[in-house]
Amino acid sequence: MSYAIIRNEKYKRENLKGIYKHNERKNKNYSNKNIDKTKSHLNYSLKKATMSYDKLFDKIRGSYHLKGQIKTVSNIACEYIITSDREFFQEIGTEETKRYFKEAYNFVCKR
């Protein structure tokens, strides 16, 4: 039986550059041996990053005129990972997989 995975991770400013490089597959080497770079062409984005996450944070902060001090221990971003197991995606196929992720993305955006 398949299962859903929903994970929430909090990040400090110092983590944003590395998370951006990992998520956007900008790294040349990965310590995680499960990453198969030959399949990178199959990746797609529902919302393409237009700039690095730290620059995007600064832009959002400026556009809302947010003042206040951000300490090095402050969490400033959250990342949600929503997925399932391999068997689930193999069973539903490519188009339904894309729909699954689009619906999950829309659900999170509305909350």
Image (cartoon, grey):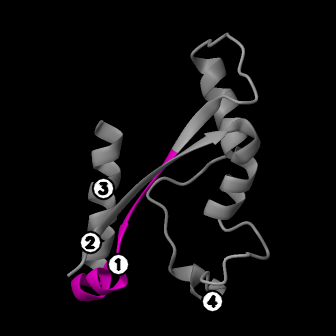
Q: Earlier in the sequence, mark 2 or mark 1?
A: 2
**21 relative to 38, above or below:** above
Q: Amino acid at mark 3?
A: Ala
What is the CA distance from the residue labelled 2 to the residue labelled 1? Answer: 6 Å
Q: Earlier in the sequence, mark 2 or mark 3?
A: 2
Read off the magenta span.
79-94
The answer to whether the residue labelled 2 contacts the one labelled 1, judged by CB atoms less than 8 Å apart, is yes
Q: Amino acid at mark 2?
A: Tyr
Q: Which residue is mark 2?
A: 3
Please, which residue is most extreme toward the left here? 1
- In this rendering, the label closer to the viewer, 3 or 1: 1
The quadrant of the picture occupied by the C terminus is top left
What is the x, y in percent for residue 58?
69, 29
What is the CA distance from the residue labelled 4 to the residue labelled 2? Answer: 26 Å
The answer to whether the residue labelled 4 contacts the one labelled 3, judged by CB atoms less than 8 Å apart, is no
Q: Amino acid at mark 4?
A: Thr
Q: Earlier in the sequence, mark 4 or mark 1?
A: 4
Q: Earlier in the sequence, mark 4 or mark 3?
A: 4
Q: Give residue 38's mark.
A: 4
**Relative to 92, is 63 on the left or the right?**
right
Q: Which residue is mark 3?
A: 104
Q: Which residue is mark 1?
A: 85
- 109 and 69: which is toward the camera: 69
Q: Is residue 82 magenta?
A: yes
Under circle 3, the secondary element is helix
**17 relative to 59, above or below:** below
